[in-house]
Each structure stands twice: as C-alpha cells, then as structure tokens.
Image: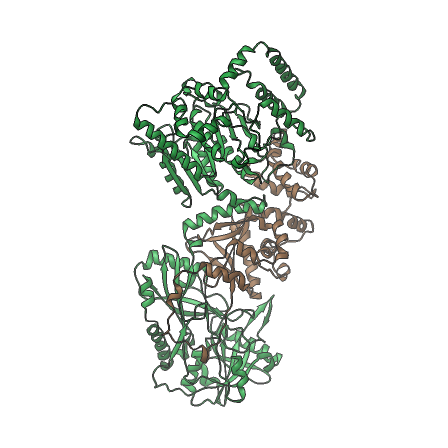
Chain colours: A green, B brown
C-alpha cells in the first residue's frame, strides 16, 4: 500500500478497505456447544446468527465483527451504539465436511442475495442487508477443538475504485460548528429511526450546518447530484482506510445512481467517547469516482473469506479444552487453588515438587483412604495403592473411598476400588492399584513351592513398586507388615512416611533416610544411642533450649522399628501400643492420615528433603526451617489430651529393620535372607542384630541399672515440677527420658 | 454484655485480628480488640457476618452508622444509577438480564492491544495440530487489489458485576481472551499487567483472585473473591459516614477493585452518580 501511494504520479491511487477480523467471545463457543448438543445435534442446515460491529474503538484496534453468546438470538438486542450484522452459520458434523464444503459457492450465494437486494431496491429501504457474514464451523466436542472460517462477502468492482481526494480527518474538513451540527443531526436520525446506530446515511452540508438523512430519502434529500456526500458507520480506526462495510454500499450507489454521479464524497463516521468526552473529529472523509455498474448485469465478483493468522487463505482453529473440557477444568482448578496458596500465603512454596511426587500407599484402609484424599488435596497426581483385603461392611463408614455397594457380593478389592474412586473424584489422577500381600516376618511362606514362589514374586513386585515411587507410606494395620517395605526402602534410599494408630494415640513419622550408598564408607553407621546423644548435644550448645536429642540430621534418624527391642513377629503376641488392633477412635485415622501427608509436604519443602534435621517440640518457638514450618521426625498424638508431641530419635544400631547388618544381609542375599526372616520366629532377627545379647546383658545387669532407673524417675519428677508452668515441656522431656533409657527398660 | 458473649467473640475475632494486624503493622491488636469487644452484641453465629459490620460503627458516633454491606435491592438501584451515567459517558456498561431467573449482571467488554510476543507463543501452543493442512488456494483473495492488512494481537477483557447474596456485596467476575475466544490463563493475565504495578497488586485485592464458574452462565471466570470486599470498603464507607457524604457503593467499590484487573472507572462517576435513597 505504502509503495502504491508513492507511485501516485503514475497512476491514481485506488481505495483500499480494512477487512473485518472475526472476534469471538468465549461465550459464543460455549453457546455453540450447547446448541450442537441440545438443538442442532446432527442437523447441518444453515442457521441465522447475529454479530455486531462498533465504530467507537480507540485507534490501534483492528476492525472487528464480534459474535458473543447472544449471537444465536437473532431477534435479541444489539449492544448500544453498535451495528448489527446478520450471518449464516454452517456447522458441519465432521472435519471432512468442513474441508469439502464449497466455500466459493457459499460466498456466491450470499453475494447473489446481496446483489438481488440491491437490484430490487430492498437494500435502499434497509441498507443493513449489505453487511452480511458467513460462518463455517466444525466443533470437535471430544477434544474441544473448534475449526472456523469467516466470510464477509463483498462485491467487487473489477477495476477497483479510484480515489479522487485522499482521506483526511473530518476536523481538517469541517469546522467545529459543522462537526457539532453533524453530531446533533446524526443523533436525531438515530432517535427518529429508533436505534442507536445507523449503518448508512446521507449527508448534506453548508458552512453553517450539516444535515443527515436515511438512504431511502435520497431523492428528497439531494436536489442536485453534482456533489453527493454519503455517510457510513465505520468500524475501522485506520486514518487512510475505510472499513469493510463501505464496499457493498459503494456497489449499491454505483448501480443505483452511478450513471448520474460523477464524484461521491464518503464520510467514514467514527464516534468514540473517552472519559465522557465524545469525538467524531477523527472520522475520515474522502472522494471517489465510482466505476459504472449496470443493474442488469450479472452479480459482480465477490470476495470475503478471512485469512488465517499466518496470512494464508485458510480456516482458523481454537483449542478450548482448557476452559471447556470438564476434566481439564478440574485439573486447572485444582492447580489454581494450590497456586493461590502460594500467591497469598506461602510465596516460596514449591508446588512442582509436591505435584510431581509419586506416592506409594501400602494399605488402603482407614489410613490409606485418608492419606490418598489429602494427597489429592495437595495436587499429587501419582498415587498407587497396595492392599490385599476386600471391602467389608464395616469399612465404608470409616474409609472414605468406599461405599455400601462396594461391600456387596463378597466385597471389591480395596486397592482396585480405591483407584476407581480416586478417578471419580478427580479424573486427572494417575492412580493404580495392586491387590497383593506383603510377606511378613514370622508368617512362614515355606509351605510349598507355590507359596515360596508367590512370596518371591510379591517381594519382587514390592521392590519394583518402591523403586518406581518417591515416597512410601506405611499405612497397614499390623506392625510386622511394615518390616519388609522398611528394609527395601531403606536399602533403596526412599523416603518412608509411617502412620500407625492405637485406640486414642497415634504415631506419624518419617524414617531416617540413609546417606547415598557411595558415601556410606566415610560415614560411621549409627552407633549406640548414648554416645550419639552426647555428641549431638555437645556440638550444639549455642541453641537455646536445645534438648538432648535436638538437631539430629535426617540420615541418623530412626525408623519405626528402632524404638523397639523386639523383632516384628506374629502380632497375636505383640503388645506395643500403636498396633494393638485397629479399634481406634474414628477421628484418629483422619488426623494421622492428614498429618502423614502434611509431614511429607513439609519434608519436600525442605531443601535437604529426607535429610533435613529433625525439628522437635523445642523448635516451635524458633525460626522454622521451611516455608511451611517444622520438619519433625515423629508426631505422637494423644487424643485423650488433644495433644501432640514431636519427639526425635536416633537410628538404633541393633534395629531389626534398618540396622547395617540387616541391610547388608538383604542386599547380599536378597530373597534368601528375607525368606529366612519370614519363616523364623523373631529370634532370628534378634540374634542377627544383637538384640538377644542385649536382652541377656540387660537381665544380668538389671540390679546394676536399678540406680539409673531411680535417677530417671527423679529426673522425671524434677522436670514435671520445674516445667509445671510450661505446658509444652513435661511430656516431651518425659518422652526423651523414656527414649534414652527405654532400651534398658523394655517394660517401661 | 455477659462475659460469655465476650469470650465467644474473642474466639472468633482473635485469629482474624491477628492476621489483620500482621498485615498492617500500624494497627495494634489490643486497642483494636478492646474497641471491638465492647460493641459486640449477643448475636448468634448467623450474625457473625453482620458483626464485622458492627465493628465498623464502633466510633462513638452512635447507632445510625452505615453498613459496609449492600442489600440486593440497593445493589440493583446502585447499578441502575451507575448504568444511567455510563450511557451518558458511553462507557460501555450494560445490563444483561438472565432469562428465566430475574437475576442479571452488569457487563462491560474492553479490548486491549496485546503484547504480541506474550500471545504469539500461546497461539502456537494452543493451535490444533492440523489446521495448516486446511489452507485452500482456490478461495479468492483480493489483498493485492482492495484490502489492506491489519495484523494485530488483541486481548478482550470481559467484566461482569454480580451480586453475592452470601457475602452481601457485589462481586467482580472477569475473563480475558484472544479474539478467537480462547481464554487467557491466570499467568497470561498476570503477564499482561505492568511489572511496576504487580507488587502493589499482591498486597491488594488481587490476592483474593480465584477461578469460579459464573453463577448465571456456568462458564469459568476469574473472580476477585468477595471474602475481603467488606474489609476494603470499610475505611471508605466509614470516612464517608463521618463526613456525612452519601456514596454509591458500586462506584466506590468498582474504582477500588477495577484497576487491579485493568478496568478503569473514570473519576467523574464519583461525582456524577448518586447513591440510591
């Protein structure tokens, strides 16, 4: 265009028009989807729709034809000060039909209708019929992809339109008086025709005043046809070009009055209000010479298909799955909710770490169900269940992933039913369930070749599962079933979060995460509790309130079995508090399950992850190590008192699960070692780890340690008295004392 | 006032006040608290919301204090007055009555020339895979003859003002889209805010931003959640009350909320739009 203007000398410049850009509000696609699903279904017949254009845009915006959700209400109101445009919607059922639709034929058909309206004079009566559009669509409602192609039919003068006078701003042509007179006249025309916008009109002006009239009053309005001025409601904002609606109007003028007219002056009426101040000064005005066009001739050539964003003649497409696909909506809403937590409250929260964590839930009972739900709340997408039980009638009231129906005819497998429910709750979840048993110490597997082979397969399966996940949750109802995963995960250096329930007490803990294998040699394996406690307390004297067991780094923390001096075995003979049986206060599983997940989240937010130094109750007053607060080793809860304490304890070198000797044997002998454990009574593990020896020593030295026990009790009492004013300390101190001497007083 | 009532109120109030005093370090908790506690009426939980309202009239002014809430009738009247002036200004606001229910909302759409780079990547990311294969050579194109090219990234912001019965305040819903109707994500909306403005926004009502379904259209919209609206409005309404000025709630509220999401409310609204009687 620029090049063309510079060549003015050689050939008179031709008028160029700014085509419409299609502008579709999101609501239009929603409405189209509704119409397709409920009304049109497979009906491909053309439908009338309605769009509008506006002449009040600030400069810089493209000339648009807008379709909003109300486009399907053909008789509905048009927004104030906008011009309506009637269109035809062709919605195809397939992409093939969309492709093979004869676009030229569609265009020709509408062009013919426009031409007929011009010939019959209908266009003079109601010139709004000149602005038409076609919309060809294909809605792929499985993917929420929409293909569309707009056409704004325009009849063409083959040789173009010659500009006689270049476009100038109205304020350069009109005086202020003329402009305000024009405004008043236009507004009066609007109100007399009962609208707020008139698409085409006639203009007559003298130095004093400006008059306007509707097109049908042509012969009354123009006494002589020497110089005729017409007005067009112009949606374009370019200073040198009129918008598309002028094209068919010029064709109408040329064919109706072209023979009598020499030169036509065109006022492209632009009318914007900014901050309450109205301006029509920036309208443009120019003169053209109309080519001759005979009414008796055939319909002129027409153009109008919109280009795609790359500038090629092709359809456009839009992928609206993010705002229309319910599954995507659920996903994005879940994510957004979490992001808002970051925006509003915890700016440094690393959500990606959380969302990408793969969680293995061993046990899909009361704890498993509650852990899974809390994980989903945190946006965790990868959740795997392992359980061998079926859903029984007592389960659904306590296990929120199951319903009564799940118990019928023998009950569904918990692991599989839990997965189904998770997907129902949130289709974006990547859940899997394994209906399998976890071999346990003291539960022999050597009945037959078959049972041995089965046990071996289960072990391999569990090893593979643990290896494929980032965090392992121990949520079973027996103590001994926690042994194998504890060993495997310790060996694989996977983080374990363990939750166990008593009647009204619970423990939620992370297992110590052993240092990576390469550096094992340099680091001394956890030595006896007393020597380590000395070193840790002496190395951190500066921290006020640091207790005997503060600042234990993650790799030195104990596991679930470190606190015990009996190896796991058949639980019928087991007596420890947190695994007596599954009769617990109903709220306990929800509390413990939620705490287990929140503990995992806090660990993930710590820069050192599972190696994070354990926070203790003492740290409640200190600067927290993560944006979410403390990263304790254990949370022990006492529902009877509605109280939690945060003890931390060291790995025990004679632990039946995570001590070096057990891990060495497991890593060296694999299933052979494990099967020995499964098949033996607990003495095997106790002999192996030296617990048997410890028992013997303890018994022999019982009298010798009597003094110590007296001291312990004295210290307890002192603490209780001393800290009477501080409700935080006594329980915790007591716990520490119990922990230090606990190994020597198993019955304590 | 019975001691039981004070106790009950403390329990509810303290977390809120603590949070508030953390944000505005100038506000000291004890003063505020003593202030409030002596005005608590023995209301049920139902009243706990009104109750923030009563905290506001804790000045010695007396009993006829203005409410920080807006009842539905006043909402409609305030909107009517707002729209009347908008039509004078041609500011683009309109009322959309929803079929079937007698509820409706005030709506405005604006277009903003987009930063091309921020949207273009998105375009390639969101385009469907096979659209390039659909280009047709046979279709006539008269660019060379009679059409001029306009290529422009434009964002369309759509604002809806609805009434929230549960919070008794107006709620601002909005969404932003490209011209093909694809909604911008929160990140894209955020990226289109001038960087020097962002810091300010994070402290303001922006942190109540969330995504919800439009209650009447059922389509996803962003919402400046009404949970803190009363908090923003209180100082303004309080001041107006002290000065015995009447303010149009919608005008005041929209001029606070709007700029956060690129919605400008011309100053003249403040003087020209009256409060409903």
Q: Is residue A74 visible?
A: no
Tell which of B40 and A509 is nearer to you: A509
Quarter residue A408 falls in: top left
Question: Considering the image in quadrants, where does the C terminus of chain A appear?
Answer: top right
Q: Is residue A112 visible?
A: yes
Position of B7 with respect to A49 (left or right) is right
Looking at the picture, does residue B179 appear above or below residue A469? below
Position of B85 with respect to A18 (left or right) is right
* Image location (x, y in percent) of residue A724: 65, 21
Looking at the picture, does residue B254 appear above or below residue A409? below
The mark total stands at: 0
Residue at 44% of width from left, 54% of height from top? A323
Tell which of B241 and A500 is nearer to you: A500
Residue reaching furthest to the top = A703
Residue at 42% of width from left, 43% of height from top? A429
* Image location (x, y in percent) of residue A733: 62, 22
Quarter residue A369 falls in: top left
Tell which of A327 and B260 is nearer to you: A327
Looking at the picture, does residue A546 appear above or below residue A23? above
* Image location (x, y in percent) of residue A670: 41, 30
* Image location (x, y in percent) of residue B219: 45, 53
Tell which of B4 and A443 is nearer to you: A443
């Amino acid at each position: 265009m620029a090049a063309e203007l510079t060549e003015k000398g050689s050939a008179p410049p031709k008028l160029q028009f700014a085509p419409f850009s299609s502008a579709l509000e999101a609501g239009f696609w929603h409405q189209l989807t509704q119409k397709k699903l409920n009304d049109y279904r497979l009906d491909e017949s053309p439908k009338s729709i309605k769009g509008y254009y506006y002449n009040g845009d600030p400069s810089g915006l493209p000339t648009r034809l807008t379709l909003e959700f109300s486009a399907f209400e053909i008789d509905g109101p048009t927004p104030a000060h906008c011009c309506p445009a009637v269109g035809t919607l062709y919605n195809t059922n397939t992409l093939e039909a969309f492709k093979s639709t004869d676009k030229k034929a569609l265009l020709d058909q509408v062009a013919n209708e426009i031409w007929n309206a011009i010939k019959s004079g209908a266009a003079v009566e109601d010139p709004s019929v000149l602005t038409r559009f076609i919309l060809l669509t294909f809605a792929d409602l499985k993917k929420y992809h929409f293909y569309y192609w707009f056409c704004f039919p325009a009849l063409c003068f083959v040789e173009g339109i010659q500009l006689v006078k270049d476009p100038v701003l109205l304020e350069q042509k009109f005086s202020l008086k003329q402009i305000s007179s024009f405004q008043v006249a236009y507004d009066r025309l609007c109100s007399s025709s009962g609208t707020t916008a008139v698409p085409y009109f006639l203009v007559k002006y003298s130095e004093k005043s400006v008059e306007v009239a509707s097109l049908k009053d042509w012969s009354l309005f123009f006494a002589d046809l020497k110089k005729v001025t017409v007005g067009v409601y112009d949606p374009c904002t370019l200073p040198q070009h009129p918008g598309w609606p002028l094209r068919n109007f010029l064709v109408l003028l040329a064919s109706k009055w072209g023979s009598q007219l020499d030169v036509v002056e065109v006022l492209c009426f632009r009318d914007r209000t900014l901050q309450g101040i109205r301006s029509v000064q920036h309208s443009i005005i120019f003169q053209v010479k109309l080519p001759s066009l005979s009414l008796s001739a055939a319909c002129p050539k027409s153009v109008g298909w919109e280009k795609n964003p790359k500038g090629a003649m092709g359809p456009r497409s839009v992928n609206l799955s993010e705002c229309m696909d319910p599954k995507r909506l659920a996903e994005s809403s879940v994510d957004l909710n979490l992001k808002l937590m970051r925006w509003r409250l915890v700016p440094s929260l690393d959500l990606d770490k959380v969302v990408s964590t793969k969680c293995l839930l061993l046990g899909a009972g009361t704890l498993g169900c509650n852990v899974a739900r809390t994980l989903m709340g945190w946006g965790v997408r990868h959740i795997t269940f392992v359980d061998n039980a079926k859903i029984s009638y007592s389960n659904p009231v306590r296990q929120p992933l199951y319903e009564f129906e799940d118990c019928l005819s023998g009950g569904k497998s918990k692991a599989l039913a839990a997965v189904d429910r998770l997907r129902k709750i949130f289709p974006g979840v990547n859940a899997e369930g394994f209906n399998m048993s976890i071999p346990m110490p003291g539960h022999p597997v050597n009945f037959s070749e078959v049972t041995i082979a089965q046990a071996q397969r289960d072990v391999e399966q569990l090893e593979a599962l643990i290896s494929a996940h980032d965090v392992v949750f121990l949520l079973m109802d027996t103590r001994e079933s926690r042994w194998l995963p504890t060993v495997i995960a310790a060996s694989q250096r996977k983080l374990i979060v363990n939750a166990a329930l008593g009647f009204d007490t619970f423990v939620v803990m992370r297992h110590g995460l052993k240092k990576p294998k390469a550096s094992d040699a340099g680091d001394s394996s956890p030595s006896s509790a007393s020597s380590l406690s000395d070193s840790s307390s002496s190395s951190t004297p500066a921290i006020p309130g640091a207790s005997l067991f503060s600042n234990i780094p993650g790799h030195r923390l104990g596991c679930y079995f470190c606190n015990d001096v009996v190896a796991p075995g058949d639980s019928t003979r087991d007596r420890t508090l947190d695994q007596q049986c599954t009769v617990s206060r109903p709220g306990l599983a929800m509390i413990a399950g939620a705490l287990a997940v929140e503990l995992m989240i806090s660990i993930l937010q710590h820069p050192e992850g599972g190696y994070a130094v354990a926070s203790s109750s003492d740290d409640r007053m200190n600067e927290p190590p993560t944006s979410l607060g403390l990263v304790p080793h254990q949370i022990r809860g006492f529902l009877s008192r509605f109280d939690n304490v945060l003890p931390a304890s060291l790995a025990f070198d004679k632990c039946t699960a995570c001590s070096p000797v057990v891990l060495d044997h497991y890593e060296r002998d694999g299933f052979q070692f494990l099967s020995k454990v499964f098949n033996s009574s607990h003495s095997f593990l106790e002999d192996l780890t030296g617990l048997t020896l410890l028992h013997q020593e303890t018994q022999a030295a019982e009298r010798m340690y009597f003094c110590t026990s007296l001291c312990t009790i004295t210290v307890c009492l002192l603490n209780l008295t001393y800290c009477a004013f501080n409700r935080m300390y006594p329980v915790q101190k007591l716990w520490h004392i119990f922990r230090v001497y606990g190994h020597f007083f198993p019955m304590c | 006032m019975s001691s039981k009532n004070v106790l009950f109120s403390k329990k509810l109030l303290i977390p809120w006040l603590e949070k508030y005093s953390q944000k505005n370090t100038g506000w000291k908790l004890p003063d505020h608290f003593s202030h409030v506690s002596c005005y608590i009426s023995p209301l049920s939980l139902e009243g706990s919301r009104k109750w923030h309202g009563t905290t506001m009239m804790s000045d010695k002014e007396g009993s006829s204090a203005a409410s920080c809430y807006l009842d539905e009738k006043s909402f409609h009247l305030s909107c009517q007055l707002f729209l009347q002036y908008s039509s004078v200004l041609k500011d683009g606001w309109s009322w959309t009555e929803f079929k079937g229910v007698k509820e409706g909302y005030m709506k405005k759409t604006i277009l903003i020339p987009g930063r091309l780079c921020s949207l273009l990547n998105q375009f390639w990311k969101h385009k469907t895979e096979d659209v390039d294969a659909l280009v047709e050579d046979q279709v006539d194109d008269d660019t060379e003859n009679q059409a001029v090219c306009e290529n422009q990234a434009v964002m369309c912001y759509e604002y809806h003002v609805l009434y929230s019965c549960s919070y008794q305040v107006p709620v601002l819903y909005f969404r932003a889209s490209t011209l093909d109707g694809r909604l911008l994500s929160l990140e894209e909306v955020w990226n289109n805010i001038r960087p020097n403005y962002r810091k300010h926004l994070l402290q303001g009502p922006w942190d109540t931003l969330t995504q919800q379904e439009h209650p009447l259209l059922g389509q996803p919209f962003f919402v400046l959640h009404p949970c803190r609206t009363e908090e923003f409005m209180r100082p303004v309404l309080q001041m107006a009350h002290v000065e015995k000025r009447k303010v149009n709630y919608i005008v005041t509220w929209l001029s606070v909320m709007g700029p956060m999401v690129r919605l400008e409310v011309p100053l003249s609204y403040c003087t020209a739009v009256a409060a409903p009687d």
